[in-house]
Amino acid sequence: MSTCDDLYKRQATAALEDRQKVIVELRAVEADNRLSNTEKRERVEKLDRHALQLEAEARVAIERGERAAEVRALASKNPALFTPGNPEARSDEWRALMPSLNEYRAATQGSVPSAGGHTVPDAMAGKYVEILKAKSTFLRALPTENILSFETDNLQVPQLTASSGEDYVAELATIPEGTMTWSSLTFPAKKLGRIQWASSEVLEDSALDLRNIIGQNLLRDASLRFDKDAFTGALTDPIKGIIAQGVTTTLTAGNVVVKYDDLADAVARIEATNSAPSVVWASTDAAAALRKEKSSGSGTYQGGSPTESPASTAWGLPVLTSGHLPSKTVIVADASRLIVGIRRNATIKVSEDARFDSDQVGFKLTMRVAGVSLAEASSVQIVKAAAS
C-alpha cells in the first residue's frame, strides 16, 4: 500500500477499521448465550457478509491507488506516450500498446464463455453467488492455543509420556524419587500450492471483482483440502488425519447407523482416560441419522421436533457435520488433545511478469502446514456403523 495515493490509503484504512469493528461484534454475538441458535446463526452470517464486503472495498481502494501510481510513473518516464499528436504519424508507436491478433490466451479469458466469458456479457450484475463458503469444520472445534505457529522446517512439541514414584511414606522413612519419561511430537512442514492464470482483458472487462473472486476461491480450495486431510489423511500422507491416529470401534452386525447411545459409550471411553470430550464430528449420512433417531416405542424425535431448528448438540457436545468423513462415521474427541502446526498461513501473491509476453496475470497461493497430532490415541474415538 506504500505506492497508493493518500486518498486511496484513507479509503482502505477506513474500510479495514470498520471491518475490525464488525469482527469484534461478530465474536460478541458468537459468545452471547442469550441468543437462540437461529438468531445467532442469522446475525453471524449477516456480519460475516459485511466483513467480506469491507475487505473487498479495502482491496479495491489499494488496487486503484497502485494503478494510479503506476500510470504516473509511466508518464514521468515516457511523457511522449501521453502527449496528443498526429495519430497517422504515431500509429506504429501506439500499436505497440495494443494486443496482437494471435495473442495466446489459454487460461481464464473473456472470449470463451466457459473460461470466463459468462462474467462479461453486455448486461451483468455486479455481484456473484458463492456456492460454497469454506469454513474449516476441523479447525473450528480446536482451541486457539492448540494451533501452533513455528519458524523452522520442523516443529518439536515436548510430551510427557509417563511418570512414577508416588507412594505412601512411613514416618521418618526416605521419600522415594520419581521418574519422568519424555518424548516429543514432530511436525514437518508441508506446502499446499496452486496457481490460477487470467488474461488482463477478463480482469479489466468483467463486471465482477475477479481478482478478489480468484483469490477467495484459491483460499477456499486450500481450506477444503486441509480439512479433508485433517480427518482422513493416512499415516504415510503429508498430513496425517485423526482417523488414522485415533481408536476405531465398529458396531456389531445389524447396527447400520450410529445412535446417541453409541456416542454415550464413546464419551465414557474418553472420560475413562481423564480427558474431557468437547466435540462430535459426523459424516453427512450419520448426522442425518442422528437427527431422525426416535425414542424407543414412540414417534418422538430424539433431536427435537422437525419444525424446530435441527439439534446441534449431543450429550452437551456440539455436533459438526463434515462431508469429508467416510460414510456412517462419527468421531467423538477431546479437541484440547489435538495439535495442529502452521508454518505459514495461506498467502496469495499476484504476478504480471511470468507470462509477460501473453499479458496474463498469475495468482499464486501457498500455505505450509505441519499436520495434526494426538497427545494420545484414546482422545479420539471413531465410531463406525456396521455395513449391514
Image (spheres, rainbow, N blue to C red):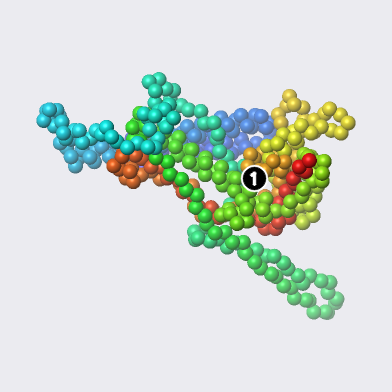
Question: Where in the figure is residue 387, as x and y percent of width and height?
Answer: 76, 42
Q: For the N terminus, give its image quadrant.
A: top left
Would you identify the image quadrant in which residue 161 lies? bottom right
Question: Where in the figure is residue 261, as x and y percent of width and height?
Answer: 81, 42
**Residue projecting furthest to the top:** 123
Left or right of 300? Residue 134 is left
* Vertical relation: 153 (above or below) 114: below
> Which amino acid type is shown beneath numbered disc 1?
Ala
Q: Dot 1: few (<14), some (14–19), or many (≥20) neighbours within 10 Å?
A: many
* Along the line of sight, the residue nearer the viewer: 175 or 88: 88
Q: For the C terminus, give its image quadrant.
A: top right
Which residue is depicted at the point 57% across and 59% down?
Answer: 187
* Vertical relation: 136 (above or below) 40: below
Which residue is depicted at the point 19% across and 33% down?
Answer: 94
Which residue is depicted at the point 65% across and 29% down?
Answer: 39
Residue where numbered disc 1 is placed: 141
Report whether residue 82 is seen.
no
